[in-house]
Image (tube, grey):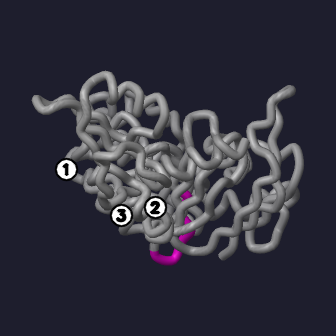
Amino acid sequence: MDLTIEEVSKRYGGIWALRGLSLRCEPGMLGLVGPNGAGKTTLMRLIATLLDPTEGTIRWNGQDLRTHGEALRQVLGYLPQEFGIYPEFSGRQFLRYLAAMKGVPKAVAHRRVEEVLEMVNLEQVADHKLPTYSGGMKQRVGIAQALLNDPELLIVDEPTAGLDPAERVRFRTLLASLTSSRIIVLSTHIISDVEAVASRLVILQAGQVVSDTTPEKLLAATVGKVWSVTVDQATAMQLQAAYQVSTMVNQMSGVTLRLVSATRPHEAAIIVDPSLEDAYLLVMGQHLVLV
């Protein structure tokens, strides 16, 4: 299976959401990150055939989605950023309804619903009404409906936004368990989600790819460029204005900052091990300087 995006651009009126974006995706998990407005959701909707590109081509197994979109939709699972539920349904009823809407044959629909309920660990509450579910449980229903047709391509757009830390970990673990034999595209602005599960990292800014790498390589490129220093309040404000700051903590001894910089930001600063969030900030800072 192969998903190829060739010089794709998307314009809304006079605004370009994507410009000349090219990617090739093979089985595994691709983490798509970037700030709000970078074009992540637009790209997800283009891949899911909900939008047509203004320019460029998207191919699934070599076939142009403009003319062969149905071939992709038959093997697509999609969890959008805004996932609606029907409050009168229980989890099991909702999934059976969606299985029918997706055209899953009746002979296999009930069995498949039970399989995905087990996969997302919702068997015990499957007959409870959906409004009684927590945010994390509703997201698990969302991923369950996306898996009903056992998709070859799974797209999840900001799946952990609004979840508490424990629910986020559970959801990431679930996604990681699905990576064999399918392409998963995980769109998020939460860097720790990508660090935990993705083998490939694509960073978008202003509708363009500014980095296509692995988390390990991005971290390696950031070694020696992350600093920690404790200073007084006035100096902390000066450093914050001049450098990218990933954390700033007020302590009895002063303000401790974690800064991302290719050069020593302060004479008292010491090098510390980078996190993927630090590496992301470095890439974004370099790109902003370039543009």
Looking at the image, which is closer to me, 116 or 285?
285
Quadrant (top left, top right, bottom left, bottom right) of the C terminus: top right
Precedes in sequence: disc 1 or disc 2: 1
- Asked if the stretch drawn in magenta spans residue 182, the answer is yes
Which residue was labeled with disc 3? 115
Residue to which mark 1 is pinned: 124
Which residue has dot 2 on it?
A: 222
- Taking the spot 24% from the left edge, 53% from the top edge, the residue there is 123
Viewer can see residue 261:
yes
Label 1 secondary element: helix
Where does the image place residue 95, in percent across and percent down from the top left? 43, 47
Magenta run includes residue 261: no
The amino acid type, in three-letter code, at marker 1 is Gln
Asked if residue 79 is positioned above or below residue 233 in the image, the reply reads below
Marks 1/3: CA–CA distance: 13 Å
> Which badge, 1 or 3, is on the more N-terminal residue?
3
Judged by depth in the image, the label closer to the viewer, 1 or 2, is: 2
- SS of the residue under disc 2: loop
